[in-house]
Image: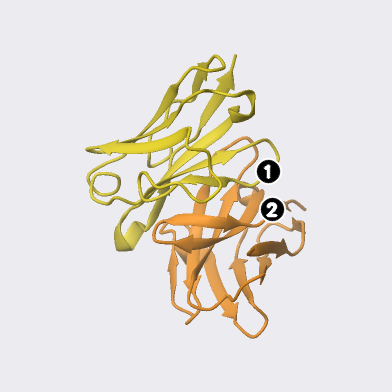
Chain colours: A orange, B yellow
Amino acid sequence: QVQLQESGPGLVKPSETLSLTCTVSGGSISSYYWSWIRQPAGKGLEWIGHIYTSGSTNYNPSLKSRVTMSVDTSKNQFSLKLSSVTAADTAVYYCARHQLGHFDYWGQGTLVTVSS
Amino acid sequence: QSALTQPASVSGSPGQSITISCTGTSSDVGSYNLVSWYQQHPGKAPKLMIYEGSKRPSGVSNRFSGSKSGNTASLTISGLQAEDEADYYCCSYAGSSTYVVFGGGTKLTVL
């Protein structure tokens, strides 16, 4: 059974860069797309972007200028960096496996708060 | 404002059936048979319930079914049970520039 686990700081200062890592266990990270999705408290889901294990990426156009994703197949991990964060970036961040338009495995989510 | 439109809330009694709609455009729902539905209980991660419009992952009850007509997809839950009370989100592939769009979510209350 594939399992995903997000990790990273729970508190980030405004204007700084949010960095999260997702570790995949129970299966290989290779030959799949891997996504980041976020959810502000009490609100809906927002797709941030995805990365293929070759390193190719697609990002949400509304966040594209601030997002960078990377993958480390040797560690079965992929990562998210979101720059110049503001309070509007406070949310639960999920990592998920992305297949043909759907997300079949999800991490438990990690809350990231942007505050000084 | 979400790209896909869902009703904010629906409700039904145990044993009844309910349908949640998800309206998009000809650039997303209407062009691709790649709509998925997710169930989310409070404090939990979303769970895939339907993919590619009408397919159920292994382990998902056959009380859940999906369909599409034009630019609108629908999730039907039959034989409502208390455990079905949750938020439900639709999602669609939206082409190679936008890629993924979600609905705003629907809160299902089992009366």
Residue found 65% across the figure and 57% down from its top: A107
Residue annotated with mark 1: B44
* Mark 2 crowdedness (10 Å alpha carbons): few <14, some 14-19, many ≥20: some
Q: Is residue A115 left or right of residue B15?
A: right
A33 or B65, which is in the foreground?
Answer: B65
Q: Is residue B2 left or right of residue A7?
A: left
Amino acid carrying label 1: it is Lys
Q: Is residue A112 left or right of residue B12?
A: right
Label 2 lies in what chain? A
Residue found 46% across the figure and 25% down from its top: B78
The part of the image, by quadrant, that contains residue B65 is top left
Which x, y percent locates residue A47? Answer: 49, 54
Image: A7 above or below A53? above
Residue A108 image label: 2
Residue found 62% across the figure and 55% down from its top: A94
Q: Is residue B26 left or right of residue B4?
A: left
Amino acid carrying label 2: it is Gln
Which x, y percent locates residue A38? Answer: 58, 51
The part of the image, by quadrant, that contains residue B102 is top left
Q: Say whether marks 1 and 2 touch (CB < 8 Å).
A: yes
A52 or B18, which is in the foreground?
Answer: B18
Secondary structure of the residue carrying numbered label 2: loop
Residue B93 visible in image: yes
Which x, y percent locates residue A15? Answer: 65, 61
Distance from disc 1 to disc 2, alpha carbons, whole Å, reads 7 Å
Label 1 lies in what chain? B
Residue A86 visible in image: no
